[in-house]
Amino acid sequence: MDARSTIQAGKAILGIEFGSTRIKGVLIDEENKPIAQGSHEWENKLVDGLWSYSIEDIWAGIQDCYADLRANVQKLYGVEIESLAALGISAMMHGYMAFDKNQNILAPFRTWRNTNTARAAKELSELFVYNIPLRWSISHVYQAILDGEAHVKDIDFLTTLAGYVHWQLTGRRVLGVGDASGMIPVDPKTKDYDRTMVEKFDKLIAPRNLGWKLLDILPESIPAGADAGCLTVEGAKKLDVSGHLKPGVPLCPPEGDAGTGMVATNAVKQRTGNVSAGTSSFSMIVLEKELSKPYEVIDMVTTPDGSLVAMVHCNNCTSDLNGWVGLFREYQEALGVPVDMGVVFTKLFEAAGRGDADCGGLISYNYISGEPVTGFADGRPLFVRSATDRFNLANFMRSVLYATVGVLKVGNDILLKEEKIKVDRITGHGGLFKSTNVGQKILAAALNSPISVMETAGEGGAWGIALLGAYLVRNAKNLSLADWLDQEVFAGNTGVSVDPDPAEVEGFNAYIKNYMDTLPVEAAAVQYKK
């Protein structure tokens, strides 16, 4: 069936993902291939010192994304979307969205980017004997309790952004197990919240008489392929303001962007991994067994089907890179030269590829916000060089690109060198891998590991959540998620692999030593910034 007929027959599947700077929708056909897309650009805002998106922006954004998708479908195929075979919602993980019994949000949405939860995360990590990151929902709610925020006693439902949107579309308070594992740790055996930790938390807050226990307010944790409800009449109106989309569409469990990244790169099986490099970056390695001990810089989450994953999450990745590229664009405009951003990115990435393996001594810190892996609660982008460093365009751009994965290397060195984790394949996806193969080669040098990139690397999480929608309704053979992806979607395709260049590995190691030794300069910049 061609794409037009697939859409007309209501057999297309839609995945929508809320990224940090863009909401993207991808429509796939019966062969799981993208056939249309839509998007909406948005930005977080500082509200009372915390990074947030408003409820109004969430709904205006998804509605504009869907309208853009409709326009794309009409332009390409001349038809209207009346029905879908399935729908999936994904979003940036973690954070804090608390609602009262009347579905009113009790505090502005606090995103993963906030680092105000240090005390809560430290106390919970000690209580659970398990690393609890600053951005996890349990850290946010406990910090609100510690800070004596009045709204806490009124919490009726606590969820993530994906869980919130799914709830409004279906009426169901559920969350995919991968996203749920970013609220409070999940037991891989039960695919549900770790009951021992839940009991410890309830005991911890009991003297405060808040009127609720943790399981009273959390969404139900469910694995990929489970029934997660259907699009209601109200939900259809919220998504498609034109009124064409009919209710009754089944939805897959809502997932976080980490889970959809694993799906989009076929990295759900043990001994596989992926690196997502966009506004933030994170690596996910599916483990064969538990780590030997907790590490403050390594988060333990799960795949969308509940397997244990070691995650290294970095708050900053390409934002500072994009800022520098924007500066070069302005220079071109000042010269009166026509600007094609694709060409600008490609030329600058190619220049970086010609740079010295150690960047000639140049160092970049891309800390738009704080970076917990290196111990920064706040950040300031910074470029550092000495008079004797080899300062040229190639080394400058290489240092900026190294910075995008530098912190990621710090965390992964623990997994690969100290814990000696075995990985058969790591796949990269996200904006860093779109221009030439320079980003791929730099990541290979950083991790000293072969890195694969697929043709679908640019599709990202929206395609990943669409695939989870397909897994819900098209898994006729009742396969596991990993086997279904292998057999029905990727069919043995592992992408184009790049091996690490020994000289570049050595150069990156020299760069990262300078980077770590010079961190006090970044700390001073943060301390004295206006």
Image: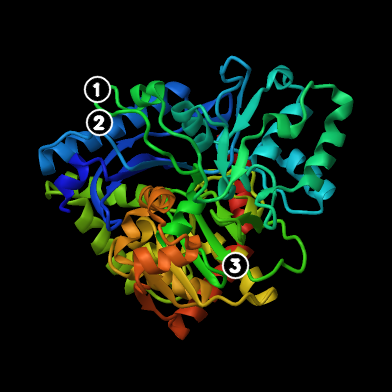
Q: In the current view of this chain or complex, which residue is farthest to the bottom?
A: 502
Q: Nearer the viewer, mark 3 or mark 2?
A: 2
Badge 1 marks a residue whose secondary structure is loop
Name, please, the residue furthest toward the top. Answer: 102
Asked if 95 appears above or below 481 in the picture, the reply is above
- Horizontally, residue 95 falls left or right of residue 469, namely right
Marks 1/2 in contact by CB < 8 Å: the verdict is yes
User: Residue 214's quadrant in the figure?
Assistant: top right
- What's the amino acid at mark 1? Ser
Read off the residue under disc 2: 67
Q: Residue at x 35, y 62 (%)?
A: 433
Q: Position of residue 133 (x, y in %)?
A: 67, 48
Q: Residues within 10 Å of mark 1 (few under 14, many from 20)?
A: few
Gap in angstroms between the C-alphas marked 3 and 2 = 40 Å
Mark 3 vs mark 1, foreground winner is 1
Measured as percent of width and height from the top left, residue 41 is found at: 33, 36
At 69% from the left and 69% from the top, the residue drawn is: 289
Q: Is residue 25 left or right of residue 529?
A: left
**Viewer-closest of 258 and 470:** 470
Q: Amino acid at mark 2?
A: Ala
Residue 412 — which label?
3
Instruction: State which quarter of the image contains the C terminus.
Output: top right
Give me the C-alpha separation between circle 1 and circle 2: 8 Å
Q: Helix, strand or loop at disc 3? A: helix
Q: Position of residue 25 (x, y in %)?
A: 32, 42
Asked whether 462 or 383 is in front, the reply is 462
Residue at 63% of width from left, 17% of height from top?
A: 101
Q: Which mark is residue 242?
A: 1
User: Which three-letter amino acid code belongs to the residue tagged 3?
Assistant: Asn
Q: Earlier in the sequence, mark 3 or mark 1?
A: 1
